[in-house]
Image: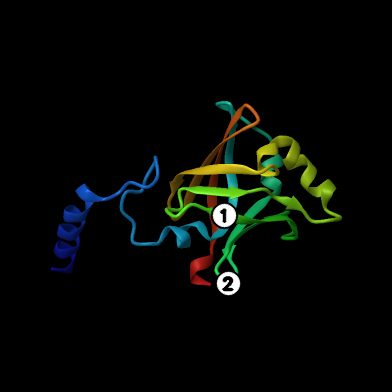
Amino acid sequence: MKKLAFILLTLLLAPGCDKRYEEGPCLSFVKAENRLCGLWSVSSMQLNEQERAGDTTELYRFSVFRNLEGSLYIQLTDTAGLVIAESLIRTDERLTELRFALVTIQGYEEDSAPLFRHCPALFGEAVWTILRLKREEMRLRTDYAWSRVIIDFSLETDYQHL
């Protein structure tokens, strides 16, 4: 009976749902802010529709979290888990865009340089449009310095249950 009620409720809500992201989901029971927070790895990166292959992106993880005041932050960590760059994230009201510019922590310039060369848009002030924000994956897009960058992320650690 509970399954039937759930299916009926989903069918009633789905036609009128407001699709926030270009690539879904249309309906989610987890708030977008909670889906965003976690430890993310880069699964693919495209620059002007060309795949940016290489080991560079495998060396880094992106941690998105809320501080005690409720502000969103992003930190870039290396394979050892050391924070080497960070930024405050500004968002629009609907959480469809993220604005940030990673700033390298003093002394870690050499550690962040390979990623900076690979994707300068991460370190310049850019507006990232969220194309997809599911519990296990995220896709961001930005137009930066005459280039279109699309990054796909895979969730490694979910922060909402910690």
**Label 2 amino acid?**
Glu
Estimate the x, y position of residue 128 in percent, counting from the top left: 55, 43
- Secondary element under disc 2, as helix, strand or loop, is loop
What residue would you read off at disc 2? Answer: 69
Does 43 sit above or below residue 11? above
- Secondary element under disc 1, as helix, strand or loop, is strand
Q: Quadrant of residue 56?
A: top right
In the visual, does 120 lie left or right of 24? right
Q: Mark 1 and mark 2: span between their CA atoms?
A: 14 Å
**Camera-side residue: 20 or 112?**
20
Estimate the x, y position of residue 143 in percent, counting from the top left: 57, 33
User: Residue at coordinates 32% horizontally, 49% vertically from top-left?
Assistant: 26
User: Residue at coordinates 33% horizontally, 61% vertically from top-left?
Assistant: 29
Disc on res. 90: 1
Estimate the x, y position of residue 75 in percent, counting from the top left: 67, 57
**Label 1 amino acid?**
Arg
Disc on res. 31: none
First-in-chain label (1 vs 2): 2
